[in-house]
Image (cartoon, rainbow, N blue to C red):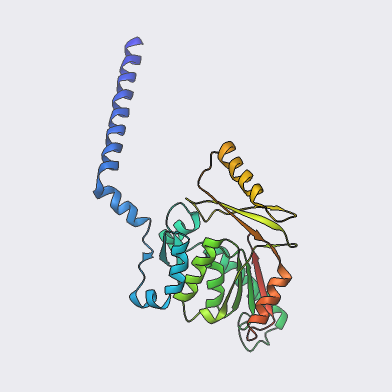
């Protein structure tokens, strides 16, 4: 019995050695790691010279934020500007060309069936055409650009400065859809609140808001920054004051700025 235990331990040691050795070889072998990196970015593409010229203002805005960005080819045929790095949504778009695709399609199909039932088959055109889709918390625009592809106008509300800058470039990259997409840079709440935008500069897609009933003062900003540094060990954090807006005010602004938009809302997605 004692000899069997010794043999078992020796076998386990050999297996562990082989696993560790092979793992080290794989990590150090560029022929293995490079295809893996490419597979994680198989939907990535570069900007064309024409796009760089046409979208120079949007590109400059992203560069002013020191944002490392690239372009993802969506399975729907559109192109979206995304972040490089640790942003989850950007990573999924670069690897698969889609985000929440099945949920998006099912949502629009369900609403179309409902509208057809209400119209009792008398619609002269698909229910989604010439309607407005309200996208609160647009993120990188997957829902908004899909809605625009379906023939809808969109009111796309996004408060994150990096995400909004990426959305502006995405709109420029899709000139046929651009007239249907209205981007509004705002955080939405039930009222007007003074908030502090917080995000780690290593992952600017992950935004948090800290709100209070009065405007943030410089001493309060300094104290909050020190608290993050001491208690959470976060040194590289963006802190930017902002004011939230009521949803009704945002919608009114969108419709006033685009009189060609029909005043009929087909649906709304909220993700904030």
Residue 50 occupies which quadrant of the picture?
bottom left
Residue at the front extreme of this rendering: 219
Instruction: Left or right? Give the position of 100 relative to 10.
Output: right
As drawn, 14 above or below 211: above
As drawn, 23 above or below 123: above
In the rendered view of the protein, which quadrant contains the N terminus?
Answer: top left
In the rendered view of the protein, which quadrant contains the C terminus?
Answer: bottom right
Nearer to us in this view, 169 or 61: 61
Instruction: Left or right? Give the position of 100 relative to 34.
Output: right
Q: Residue at x 65, y 75 (%)?
A: 113
Q: Residue at x 38, y 74 (%)?
A: 52
Nearer to us in this view, 200 or 70: 200
Q: Is residue 76 visible?
A: no
Instruction: Left or right? Give the position of 216 relative to 58.
Output: right
Residue 129 occupies which quadrant of the picture?
bottom right
Q: How many marks?
A: 0
Instruction: Left or right? Give the position of 215 relative to 163.
Output: right
Q: Residue at x 27, y 48 (%)?
A: 32
Q: Position of residue 214 (x, y in %)?
A: 74, 55
Q: Position of residue 170 (x, y in %)?
A: 48, 71
Q: Position of residue 55 (x, y in %)?
A: 43, 75
Q: Position of residue 142 (x, y in %)?
A: 53, 67
Residue at the top extreme of this rendering: 2
Q: Is residue 15 visible?
A: yes
As drawn, 182 above or below 4: below
């Amino acid at each position: 019995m004692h000899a069997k235990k010794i043999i078992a331990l020796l076998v386990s040691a050999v297996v562990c050695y082989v696993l560790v050795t092979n793992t080290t070889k794989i990590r150090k072998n560029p022929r293995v790691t490079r295809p893996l990196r490419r597979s994680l970015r198989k939907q990535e593409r570069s900007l064309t010279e024409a796009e760089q010229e046409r979208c120079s203002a949007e590109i400059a805005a992203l560069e002013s934020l020191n944002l490392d960005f690239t372009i993802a080819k969506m399975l729907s045929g559109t192109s979206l500007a995304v972040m490089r790095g640790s942003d989850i949504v950007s990573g999924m778009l670069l690897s698969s060309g889609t985000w929440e695709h099945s949920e998006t399609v099912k949502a629009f199909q369900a609403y179309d069936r409902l509208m057809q039932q209400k119209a009792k088959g008398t619609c002269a055109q698909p229910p989604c055409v010439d309607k407005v889709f309200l996208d609160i918390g647009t993120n990188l625009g997957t829902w908004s650009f899909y809605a625009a592809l379906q023939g809808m106008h969109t009111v796309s509300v996004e408060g994150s400065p990096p995400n909004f800058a990426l959305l502006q470039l995405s709109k420029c990259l899709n000139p046929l859809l651009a007239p249907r997409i209205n981007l509004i840079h705002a955080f939405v709440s039930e009222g007007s609140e003074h908030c502090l935008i917080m995000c780690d500069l290593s992952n600017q897609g992950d935004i948090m808001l800290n709100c209070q009933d009065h405007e943030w003062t410089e001493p309060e900003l300094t104290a909050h920054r020190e608290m993050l540094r001491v208690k959470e060990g976060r040194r590289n954090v963006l802190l930017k004051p902002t004011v939230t807006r009521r949803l009704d005010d945002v919608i009114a602004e969108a419709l006033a700025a685009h009189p060609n938009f029909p005043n009929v809302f087909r649906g709304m997605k909220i993700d904030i």
